[in-house]
């Protein structure tokens, strides 16, 4: 399965993906940019450069449902914080803290 989207400007954007499952929580931080000229996709495709990622054991979830909201929030913030810490670009392009990404 291929996912594409259009980029309305040449500016690069930072995107965050969060996968919350019953057993683990994953956070991925990436930078988007237009696809290279040689790419033959329909429309204007986007490529992603992974800047940071992390996963943590999920707590507070049971059978896919939230049982303890505080525990789930702590796990999500932990995964986002550690993905933020693994970033591979200049600090000036990032928000001051990972909590600003989680709003």
Image (spheres, grey):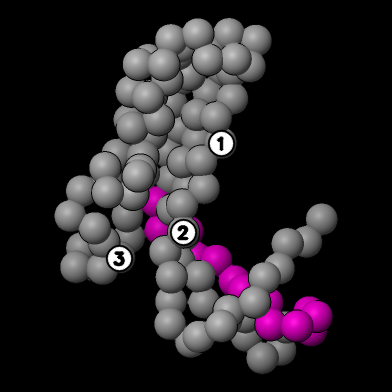
For residue 30, side relative to residue 86 (left or right): right
Tag 2's secondary structure? strand
Q: CA distance from mark 2 to mark 1?
A: 13 Å
Q: From the viewer's perspective, is the residue at label 1 or at label 3 nearer?
A: 1
Tag 3's secondary structure? loop
Q: Earlier in the sequence, mark 3 or mark 2?
A: 2
Few, some or many residues within 10 Å of mark 2 (<14, 14–19, 20+)? some
Quadrant in which residue 72 is drawn: top left
Q: Which residue is mark 3?
A: 89
Q: CA distance from mark 3 to mark 2?
A: 14 Å
Q: Which residue is mark 1?
A: 19
- CB-based contact (under 8 Å), mark 2 and mark 1: no
Q: CA distance from mark 1 to mark 3?
A: 23 Å
Instruction: Name the residue: 67% across, 70% down.
Output: 5
Query: Does residue 7 sit above or below 98 in this rendering?
Result: below
Few, some or many residues within 10 Å of mark 3 (<14, 14–19, 20+)? few
Tag 1's secondary structure? strand
Instruction: Name the residue: 69% across, 82% down.
Output: 44
Query: Does residue 14 sit above or below 82 in this rendering?
Result: below
Q: Which residue is mark 2?
A: 15
Q: Which residues are magenta?
A: 40-52
């Amino acid at each position: 399965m291929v996912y594409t989207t259009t980029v309305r400007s040449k500016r690069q954007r930072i995107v965050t993906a969060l996968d919350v499952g019953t057993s683990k929580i994953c956070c991925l931080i990436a930078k988007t940019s237009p696809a290279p000229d040689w790419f033959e996709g329909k429309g204007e495709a986007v490529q992603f450069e992974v800047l940071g990622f992390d996963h943590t054991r999920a707590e507070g979830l049971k059978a896919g449902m939230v049982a303890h909201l505080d525990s789930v929030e702590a796990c999500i913030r932990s995964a986002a914080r550690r993905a933020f810490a693994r970033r591979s670009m200049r600090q000036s392009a990032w928000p001051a803290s990972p909590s600003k990404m989680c709003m």
